[in-house]
Image (cartoon, rainbow, N blue to C red):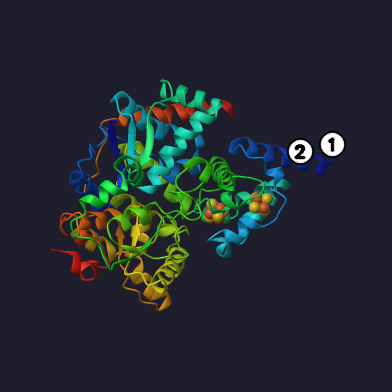
Amino acid sequence: MSVAFYPGCSLHGTGNDYAQSAHAVCQRLGLDLTELEGWTCCGSTPAHNTSALLSVALSAQNLRLASDQQRDSLVVACAACFNRLRSARHEMAHDEVLRGRVEHVLEAPAPLDVRVDHLLELLLDTYGLDALAARVRRPLTGLKVACYYGCLLVRPPEVMAFDDAEHPTSMDRVLAACGAETVDWPGKTECCGANLSLSRSDIVVSLVDRLLDQAKRAGADVVAVACPLCQANLDVRQTDVTAQTGHRYDLPAVYFTQLVGLALGAGADELGLDKSFVDSRPTLAGWLS
Amino acid sequence: MPTASDIASEAALAFRARIEHLSGQTVSSCYQCGKCTAGCPVASEMDTDPARVMRLVQLGARERVLRDEAIWLCASCETCVSRCPQACRLPRVMDALRAVAEQDGYARDNRGAALLNRLFLAQIRAFGRVHEMSLVAGFNLASRRPLRDVTKGPSMMRKGKLHLLPQRSANLPAVRRIFERVQELEGSET
Ligand code: SF4
Ligand code: SF4
């Protein structure tokens, strides 16, 4: 199977530690993660807020590129891009009228021959947990992780068909294969406020406050995420949480790929652990060489 | 001669039909159970909660709902979809309302999510990709809060998370063509 990696705008910017650690992990596992050449923005929330057709067409453009570059699958790490790309494919496949409109806009047939997979699915289904466990050099024994899936990986369930929408375990299973202990907590698929972060940061702050509180009560040492926007909200907004509510957590929010990379023997700099606001290195010191 | 209330109800029906068409959802199937509101993470911040937004669309209360801030507070988290017993995709109704609010000029003075959406799409049109630093700076300026999060920029820059210059996709022309053709097609239909 030939894959192309769709990074999306955030992974070339504020989420570059996610990209860095995803590449470190795949390189160690011998998985090809070559970027889709000439990729363009998936349109994200602003496109579907404005026009359903625009949203699907902007995502379909990238599926078309992948198809032209003879790829079978587009692998995505950002949960928000993943949601848009997989939804676009789903909608084109299930709605003939929409498909016709998209084909008119793209002046090309709908690129339905390309699958859309999340990096977690690549690790779970293509690579396999046993193979992953066999590559672990520094098991994360004793590290308690709250896996945070947020909204867009899992919802809407009929479209995303990713794991169990109410109780997803994909990330838990990947990190358990790396030796970590994943905690049971109620916040797994609660919303962090997403892009209200700019227009209404007060709402994001109260949602993040609740999530951090739940993770901490469950005994987590770190929260693991699969989305650059979730990471930014959970990490960068912690000082605002303290300012607005008086609660102080100092709970690092790391990408799941940073933890997998750590278990595979990658170093802090290679994984971009220096880039978050709440420094995870003191917590992870025992596993850093 | 039609009476004023006949005309009003015709307009109301037309509005409901427009939202149903754009969203692909049968708004009239909503029986107001309130489960969407119960699970919505931002309902407590809304003057009109998600179930009420559905009710307003059923009633065709165009002005009221298009001016309501609720449609710009919805974070598109899709929690309500997985809870709705009528399998209504409420976020699509929210999308349709935002699109109509934008088209019909109700979002012009919005300095929140609608402004962010416009700036974001302008970036895609300009570069084929989004340049986060100028997006945030542009948003803060246009929403007249230039100093918002001002302490975060420099440390992001030091951490190598922000780039001064935007990246331009090699496929920018294809993206511009998509915008043009969508506009053409949608323009010919209204
Ligand atoms: S959950 Fe569905 S049926 Fe119930 S009020 Fe909300 S939209 Fe209507
Ligand atoms: S999609 Fe919007 S209305 Fe539905 S639960 Fe999320 S924020 Fe509330």
Snapshot quadrant of residue A35: top left
Q: Is residue A156 left or right of residue B20?
A: left
Residue to which mark 2 is pinned = B10
The residue depicted at 57 percent of the width and 49 percent of the height is B81
Q: Quadrant of ligand 2?
A: bottom right
Q: Position of residue B69 (x, y in %)?
A: 56, 56
Do callouts 1 and 2 mark residues in contact (Cβ within 8 Å)?
Answer: yes
**Residue situated furthest left in the rendering:** A289
- Residue A143: give x, y in percent of width and height: 29, 67
Q: Which residue is mark 1?
A: B2
Q: Residue B109 at x, y = what percent?
A: 50, 52
- In this rendering, the answer to whether A188 lies above or below B28 is below
Q: Amino acid at mark 2?
A: Glu
Secondary structure found at label 2: helix
Tag 1 secondary structure: loop
Towards the viewer: A83 or A197: A83
Q: Nearer the viewer, mark 1 or mark 2?
A: 2
